[in-house]
Image: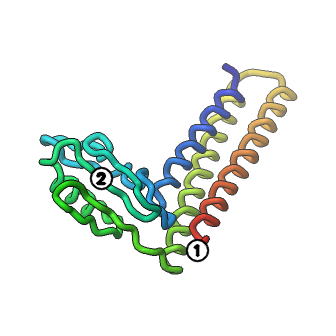
Amino acid sequence: MNYLDEIELKMEEAIETLEKRLTTVRAGRANPSMLSGIMVEYYGSPTPIASVANITVPEARQLFIKPFDKSTLKDIEKAIQEANLGINPTNNGEMIILTLPELTEESRREYVKQAKTMGEEAKIALRNIRQDGNAKIKADEMPEDQEKSLLEDVQNLINKYNKTVEDKIKEKENELMAV
C-alpha cells in the first residue's frame, strides 16, 4: 500500500469516528445511539446497554428500553441516571421510558458548541495523520520532485477531509437549530 492510500484510509477512519460521536449529540429527536456510551452493571461486569435490552423509538421524542432480563431493570435505570443525559427515566415495571424534553434555545446552542468541539478534535486528528504521513515520506529516500509531489497530494487530502468535517458540523448545526 502506498503512502497516500494509507493516509487516506486513516483520514476516513477519523471521519467515521466523528460521525459516530456526532450521533451522540442530542438533536431533539430520540435516537438509540444516544445511549451507546452507557454501560450497565450486568452480573458484575459493565455491559453496553444495547446488549442487555431492546431499544425502540415509538415516537419522535421517546425511547423505550425493554430489558431481556427483567431483573436488570433497576441497573439499567441507575446507569441512565448516572450517565447524566438530562433525561429522567420512568420505570413502569416492564420497561424504562425516556421522554426527551423540548430543546431550549440555550441547550441547542450548547449542543452546537459540543458538535463544533468534536469537529475541532477531528481536524486535530487529521493534522496528526498528515504530520505522520509527511514524516514517513521525508524519511524515505526518493527524488526531490517525487517527494514534493507526494507532500502536495497529502495536503490536498487534508484539505478535502477538513472540508468534509466542516460540512458534517454545519449539517449537525442545522439539524440542532431547526425548531
Q: Amino acid at mark 2?
A: Ile
Q: Amino acid at mark 1?
A: Val
Circle on res. 127: none
Circle on res. 65: 2
| Residue 40 horizontal/vertical position (percent) | 23, 49
**Relative horizontal placement of residue 116, taking residue 94 as reference (left or right):** right
What colour-coding does the image apply? rainbow
Q: Is residue 90 or residue 122 the one in the foreground?
A: 90
Specify the quadrant that holds the N terminus: top right
At 48% from the left and 60% from the top, the residue drawn is 25
| Residue 120 horizontal/vertical position (percent) | 59, 58
The residue to which callout 1 is attached is 179
Q: Is residue 102 or residue 145 the one in the foreground?
A: 102
Q: Is residue 34 or residue 10 the one in the foreground?
A: 34
Gap between marks 1 and 2, in whole Å?
26 Å
Compared with residue 139, is residue 61 higher up or lower down, i.e. above or below? below
